[in-house]
Image (tube, helix red, strand yellow):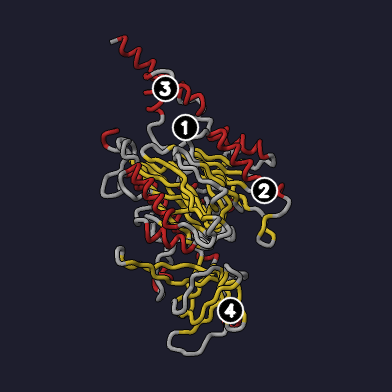
Amino acid sequence: MVGGSAALGNDDLLQHILSRLPALSFASAACVNKSWNKVCNQILSKPKLASALSLSPSLHVAVSEVLDKVLSEPIRPHFAIASVGMQSKLAATHQLITARLGSRTPVITNAVTGIIGLDAHLDEICEVKWTLLEDHLLNDFDHCYGIVLIVGYVPGLKVETIPLLRSKEEPEFSMVDKFLMDIRHYSASISGGSSPNGIILFGDQNIDIKPILAEMDYGLPEETVIVGDATSCFLFKTGENSQNYNGALYFFDAVALVFSRDSDNSNVPEIQFDVTMSTGVLPFGPELKAVSVKEHNADCSLLTARMEGYDGLLYGEEILEDIKEHIDDKYPYLYIGVIHQRGSLQFGSRSYMSLYEVLGAEDQFFIVNGVGIKPGDSFIFYHSDSDTASSSSIDVLDGLRLLNASSCCGTIGRNVTNANKEVFGGLIFSCFSRSVPLSEDYDDDDDDEDDNDVYFESYPFCRNFPETPLAGIFCYGEIGRGRGLTRLINQEEEDCSISGRCLLHHYSTVYLVMSYTIPPLLH
């Protein structure tokens, strides 16, 4: 009996020691013998995210700071996303990250207009946006330094990067069918089914991702969560996928980080992805119909429109002037929400909505960013609205509060009692143009003196899960589709005559909440 107690005490001591090791030393310790490996597996029995942000002007220092921080504790990297502000040093950053994380970890490194994360030195959340000049980053990249890195350990899931290819011999078309097939085949090889749990997508800034998202929405089940950045500049590395993608033969129009359940590892915590969103656009005006549409400068469209029941064409310049006079925001962003139909005999029909930014007008023509609108398509105008963005963020705050409370009480989940459900990480994709204070209508129970100085986009998550790792980026085109924690569609949008699914959002913030539930056999 004494010997058994001593052995138990030794195991506890060993677990205490191993749990304080950095990731590399921890990996070596797991290889010492079976006993140590068992203890290491006990330490990493639950999903884990680690994130860090650095604003060091030195690339090597910044990368070292975030890597040292995320690898300072035990973790087995199953994936990594690095977001940087120095587009000219993207390749160097990617090389440094991949070299440190090893050949089996899928990595995406992307250049962004701003980052969100926990400062590696100060241990406080930072939200940083870099100044833009004529839609391009300033030539002085010293004003755009910084990196945020997130590394994830997700037992029970397999993760891989899968690119959307476009042949350099036939550059007119992206290989979307192959892209979806590759995603389905990967998921089937891992889980036995063709439906991944989640996808984090990065689209190339030089392509129009709306038709690609439409195909993904139609071709992937609704249970598959999709979030990401539509206008990115990225590099990627595959993990265990042996397929080699030759950059000399293909352009990479997008890359998907695909999460699929591992059928060979079922007795582990069940990981769940949920999406919630703070919208920032309002619909207004009557439903209109496109009359004539023609492409303009390859990536824009000129269209004329009329109101239902009237034969005459609307005069674009006059309409835009009238719209701006009736909007409270001083410099609103204008969009048209166009309803498209997608269908086949095999899968049936589905409608979806695409938002096109209105760039201006010329005589009777509206000039919009993007192609794909057809004569006869119905649309309605939307405009950015800071009050809507602020109140919608309060809805997210309240929704996450309910998630936090319900997980403690064991009342949230899929028809099961999840007393052991826990949120272990979050990702944020926020519009660069949003700049709104937290609503004064929010009545916080705590008397924090710093409430007026909080960072806006990360506040709803950090307020509810202050110790949970979080990372995010600012972008132009936020992708979001999935199981929602709260229904945050503005009532006016629900009541308007145009309804439809929308994957690509503007003037919004998309939150991906990652949680897990421990199966009964593991209690």
How many neighbours does mark 4 have within 10 angstroms: few (below 14), some (14-19), or many (20 or more)? some
Image location of residue 97, percent across then percent down: 57, 37
Of residues 394 and 63, the one drawn nearer to the viewer in this rendering: 63
Q: Which mark is residue 254?
A: none
How many neighbours does mark 2 have within 10 angstroms: few (below 14), some (14-19), or many (20 or more)? few
Disc 4 to disc 1, how far (Cα)? 54 Å
Image location of residue 358, percent across then percent down: 57, 72
Tags 4 and 2 in contact by the CB under 8 Å rule? no
Tags 1 and 2 in contact by the CB under 8 Å rule? no
Residue topped by disc 4 = 320
**Residue 117 appears in view:** no
Task: Name the residue located 60 percent from the left edge and 43 percent from the top edge.
Answer: 147
Tags 1 and 3 in contact by the CB under 8 Å rule? no
- The amino acid sitting under disc 2 is Ser
Give the secondary structure at mark 1.
loop
Q: Is residue 16 above or below residue 77?
A: above
| Extreme residue in the bottom direction | 311
Report the number of numbered marks: 4
Residue topped by disc 3 = 15
Disc 1 to disc 2, how far (Cα)? 30 Å
Mark whose residue sits in front, 2 or 3:
2
| Earlier sequence position, callout 1 versus callout 3 | 3
Disc 2 to disc 3, how far (Cα)? 44 Å
- The amino acid sitting under disc 3 is Gln
| Extreme residue in the top direction | 2
Residue topped by disc 1 = 75
How many neighbours does mark 1 have within 10 angstroms: few (below 14), some (14-19), or many (20 or more)? many
